[in-house]
Amino acid sequence: MKILFVSMPHPTHFQPMLPLAWALRAAGHEVRVAGHPDLTETSTGAGMTAVPVGTPAWYADDPYEPALYGRLMGAGASDFLGSFDWPMSDASAWGWEGLLGLEKVLVPALYTGINNDPMIEELLAYARHWQPDLVVWEQLTVAGAVVAELLGVPHARFVYGLDFIGRAREAFLRRYEEQPEAHREDPTREWFEPVMLRHGGSWTERLRTGGFTIDTSVPSTRLDTGGPVEGLRYVPYNGASVVPEWLREPAGRRRVCLTLGRSNELENTGTTVAEILGGLASLDVEVVATLGAEEAAGFGPLPDNVRLVDFVPLHDLLPTCAAVVHHGGIGSRLTAVHHGVPQLVLGYGYDTWMIAQRQEELDAGLALAAADATAGSVRDHVARLLDEPRFAAGAARMRDELLAQPSPADLVAVLERRVEEWAEAAR
């Protein structure tokens, strides 16, 4: 088979897809990775064959930076996104106005504009040339769905975290049917339909949801979106990495990791990194903080129990840790789950607060709203993770649940079968 992976160039969105791409290659299938030119170095560095499409300089800023939504959509957009009520399970609580407002934010901010619009034409031209048998697209890079539907080939939406977007869409469609016809709006369809008609295709809900979903989330945290789902075990991958010498020696005392992703920012919290490190100084732990010299330059003297590192592969660091403090990012969260490490998530928006609360319900960690984070509150939460055995036990249960999911190698046969079934149905 020929399998085309399509992703936005943000590394943490693409990296969860790589183990499946490797497994398909190892099984003898041809694999290509298409995305903005910004993705090329990441994908080729991981051994993939890249297909640059669209324009470079995809995002000058972090795509989840609230100010970006304001620049894309005008005043008030970022406030709405931050204030939208995201109930974990009771989607019936979502009203029509809120769901419609969410669509009006997500469609221009994440689906159209700088992510998908600039790549569709070149991606379609390449796909018509290469003729893939299956397209796997990262959940926000819907250009992959557009191309698959126009070519008439099966496609899968790849989800790497809590599928609140799929859940919200399912709730939106139900509320849509309840509205008087004169009041119905569907921003998703209003964008997709002209794109499809321009190329001789037509609208289908699969453009938003995929023919099926590949979901790497832990089953007990998964949101039911009503569509077919194939579970996939998350396999940690942090990019090109070298294990440092200090990490090859046993830790002298309990180790805590502090990692805030690639931005190393705490703009959404009530504290600073330096204050958090100062608060953790009173605990009998070694703190490994993934911050570079530039970020730490203004901190002043650091506590004796702090080790600053520019970068360290989390899949090697976290097995040595008794707890981790992070911002709720995909790689940090799922790598911690993979190694059974209790987590303190400083939730601030998108799906971070939802998953933090769910992990707390499952005794796998604690949730602390970023706005409420102080040196003292972070220290006290970390002390609980270290001293209350239920958190280590809960994290171990979640790890076992994750490891019970089909491996990337296991999923290869599933994808082969889905392509065969699609071809049979088309005959």
Image: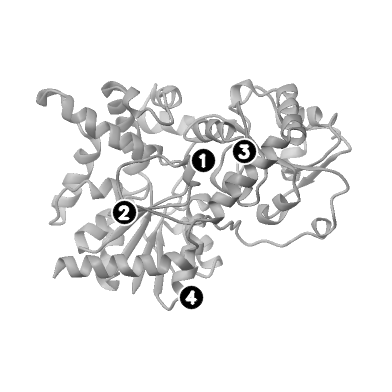
Circle 2 SS class: strand
Instruction: Provide the residue designation for mark 2.
Output: 212
- Write the residue at 20% across / 29% down: 176
Of badges 3 and 4, nearer the viewer stands 3
Query: Percent x, y for residue 53?
Result: 36, 60
Distance from Cα at disc 1 to Cα at disc 4: 33 Å
Q: Quadrant of residue 99?
A: top left
Disc marking residue 62: 1
Q: Residue at x 35, y 37 (%)?
A: 167
216 lies left or right of 388: left
Say if residue 51 shows up in the picture.
Answer: no
Image location (x, y in percent) of residue 152: 20, 63
Q: Amino acid at mark 2?
A: Phe
Q: Is residue 219 above or below residue 352?
A: below
Q: Specify the label residue 364 is tagged with.
A: 3
Q: How many residues crowd mark 2 within 10 Å: few (<14), some (14–19), many (20+)?
A: some
Q: Earlier in the sequence, mark 3 or mark 1?
A: 1
Which amino acid, mark 1? Asp
